[in-house]
Image: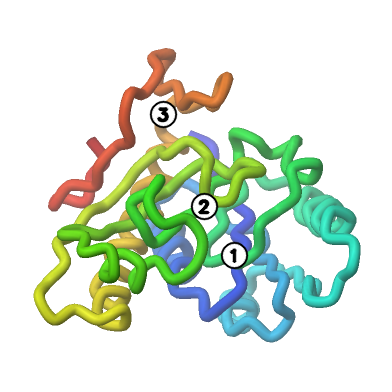
């Protein structure tokens, strides 16, 4: 199997990026990260990428004025690295639909909630305030709707008595890493297509998201 080319977009510290990079180096993911891009030029993840010898792209989206124009220009620069897939790994910006058109079906995002519950920010706090008994993370295809694209895979965990947003997020983070790695590896080893707003796996429409089991496999 030839190795895929991944572009990873980030806005923060890069813990999901590190999980992906390690999985690529170990062969768990049959791919190479050819670019790490960020809308925040001082994101710590860019330093991690630089230290690992990965090309970086940084363009400050704050105060950019024309949001759609920034998104189109940024993704055009990403496209110059010829990625097969774009992975949003803590990329804190909703991209304009006109900029996404070329990448629909080839761009995924990881989100810290059991979508469709709690799109957007503050997911741990919102889950606790709602009295949820479980929490988790989702990997979904990116569309113009905020965290609203078809869901490929999820991981679930119980909410414990006394959990705070910080403790809940800390316990979820390693599961996020495992889910993202498993999802990217799955996409590169299976025929997965996004057609008419539905995910098709090996020619069959998926009726529900895959789940990450205790053996770290998607089922």
Q: Quick check: 214 left or right of 136? A: left
Q: With respect to residue 80, does 192 lie above or below?
A: above
Tell me, for residue 190, which label it has, or none: 3
Residue found 36% across the figure and 63% down from its top:
177
Q: Quick check: 23 left or right of 98? A: left
Q: Quick check: 48 left or right of 93? A: left
Give the image location of residue 216, x and y in percent: 21, 51
Distance in Å between CA atoms under marks 3 and 2: 18 Å
Give the image location of residue 31, x and y in percent: 51, 49
> Answer yes or no: do the residues labelled 1 and 2 have beta carbons within 8 Å?
yes
Residue found 69% across the figure and 70% down from its top:
38
Q: Please count the marks in the image.
A: 3
Q: Secondary structure at mark 1?
A: loop
Outermost residue to the front: 130
Distance in Å between CA atoms under marks 1 and 2: 8 Å
Q: Secondary structure at mark 2?
A: strand
Outermost residue to the left: 161
Residue found 58% across the figure and 44% down from its top:
142
Identify the mark nearer the N-term, 3 or 1: 1
Q: With respect to residue 21, does 138 lie above or below?
A: above
Give the image location of residue 3, x and y in percent: 54, 43
* Camera-nearest residue between 48 and 53: 48
Q: Is residue 28 visible?
A: no
Q: Residues within 10 Å of mark 2 (few under 14, many from 20)?
A: many
Q: Which residue is mark 2?
A: 109
Residue found 54% across the figure and 47% down from its top:
108
Q: Which residue is mark 1?
A: 91
* Camera-nearest residue between 162 and 78: 162
Distance in Å between CA atoms under marks 3 and 1: 25 Å
Q: Which circle, 3 or 2, is nearer the viewer?
A: 2
Give the image location of residue 104, x and y in percent: 65, 35
Identify the mark nearer the N-term, 1 or 2: 1
């Amino acid at each position: 199997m030839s190795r895929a080319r991944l572009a990873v977009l980030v806005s923060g510290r890069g813990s999901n990026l590190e999980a992906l990079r390690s999985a690529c180096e170990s062969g768990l993911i049959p791919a190479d990260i050819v670019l790490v891009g960020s809308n925040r030029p001082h994101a710590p993840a860019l330093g991690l990428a630089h230290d690992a010898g990965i090309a970086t792209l940084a363009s400050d989206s704050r105060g950019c004025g024309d949001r759609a124009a920034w998104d189109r220009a940024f993704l055009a620069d990403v496209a110059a690295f010829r990625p097969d897939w774009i992975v949003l790994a803590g990329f804190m910006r909703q991209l304009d639909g006109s900029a996404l058109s070329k990448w629909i079906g080839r761009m995924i995002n990881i989100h810290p909630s059991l979508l469709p519950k709690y799109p957007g920010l503050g997911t741990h706090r919102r889950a606790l305030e709602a009295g949820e008994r479980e929490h988790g993370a989702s990997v979904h295809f990116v569309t113009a709707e905020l965290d609203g694209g078809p869901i490929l895979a999820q991981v679930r965990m119980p909410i414990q008595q006394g959990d705070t947003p910080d403790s809940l997020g800390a316990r979820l983070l390693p599961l996020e890493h495992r889910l993202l790695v498993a999802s990217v590896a799955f996409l590169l080893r299976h025929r997965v297509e996004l057609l008419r707003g539905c995910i098709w796996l090996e020619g069959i429409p998926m009726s529900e998201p895959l789940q990450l089991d205790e053996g770290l496999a998607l089922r």
